[in-house]
Image (tube, grey):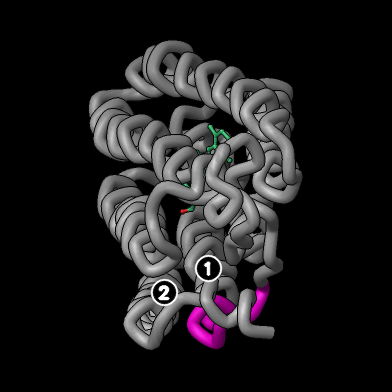
Amino acid sequence: NGASADIHITTHGSDWYWAVCAVMICATFAFMGLAHTKPRQQRIFHYITASITLVASVAYFSMGSNLGWTPIGANPQRSNPLVRGMYREIFYVRYIDWVITTPLLLMDLLLTAAMPWPTILYVILIDEVMIITGLVGALVYSNYKWAYFVFGCMALFYIVYVLAWEARKHANAMGKDVGKAFLICGSLTTFLWMLYPIAWGLCEGGNVISTDSEAVFYGILDLLAKPVFGALLIWGHKGIDPARLGL
Ligand code: RET
């Protein structure tokens, strides 16, 4: 087991994952607490947002415990046999988190913009393509992983187009307050989501940075994309009755 002992996160990586887990749990309680300050009919965004941080808590609990990973051969084309023969610790549990939470994040945004259901479902399908291609690319020992990566990036471009263009116009038409809430949360999402493929390229894809650095990179992105995003979204909704959005 000597080879696989070398690929793990260290106690620093693990401590950091536990810290992120704690923030996700606190955020879940905070969002649920805020839900109970509203009448039952007006809690939809609280429920969606709390579900996101709840699922992330479980993913970070797993990674803090150094679970939910599998060793995958790295650097298939490198000429140096020492580097080529290496394994990398791939946390597939991230993708189980993302396959649940990214559609919920998109629902938060697209329901804010009062987009029609067919559009929401289609964007979510494209989002699943993005996450699953990222997972398959991460798990294969072959340079074809980069083909999966390209499919994933194309899916991301489509999502960014819908958010930055169609949904933004729709949100503005729903009123000034809705437009502002969407602009803040939509811009944050567009910016952050474009950093995930960069992290993937350095970690699962190219095996360029260590698994501890991976913990920090994805951890900061997830803290901004889930609890910080969620707080801004709920704050943006404080004067908006979901009934106005058809909810
Ligand atoms: C992958 C690799 C394939 C290409 C692309 C990716 C994008 C992932 C994104 C993930 C977002 C995750 C969030 C998690 C929760 O906070 C799958 C890394 C484009 C955008 C927001």
Q: Is residue 236 shown above or below 161?
A: below
- Please tell me in which quadrant of the rendered image residue 191 appears: top left
Disc 1 within 8 angstroms of ligand 1 (CB): yes
- Is 178 contained in the magenta span? no
What residue is drawn where x is 46% and y is 22%?
A: 160
- Is 66 contained in the magenta span? yes
Image coordinates of residue 8 in percent, x first then y, are 52, 76
Image coordinates of residue 103 in percent, x first then y, are 62, 44
Q: Name the residue under label 1.
A: 56
Q: Is residue 3 shown above or below 208?
A: below
Secondary structure of the residue carrying tag 1 is: helix
Query: Amino acid under label 1?
Result: Ala
Answer whether labels 1 and 2 touch (C-beta < 8 Å).
yes
Q: Mark 2 points at which residue?
A: 24
Whole-number angstrom distance, CA of label 1 to CA of label 2: 6 Å
What residue is drawn where x is 54% and y is 71%?
A: 7
Nearest to the observer: residue 143 or residue 55: 143
Residue 140 is left or right of residue 180, and the answer is right
- Is residue 35 at least partly visible in the picture? yes
The span shown in magenta is 61-68
- Which quadrant does the N terminus fall into? bottom right
Nearest to the observer: residue 77 or residue 144: 77
Residue 28 is left or right of residue 111, and the answer is left
- Is residue 120 at least partly visible in the picture? no
Q: Is residue 52 shown above or below 180?
A: below
What residue is drawn where x is 48% and y is 59%?
A: 49
Query: Amino acid under label 2?
Result: Met
Q: Earlier in the sequence, mark 1 or mark 2?
A: 2
Secondary structure of the residue carrying tag 2 is: helix
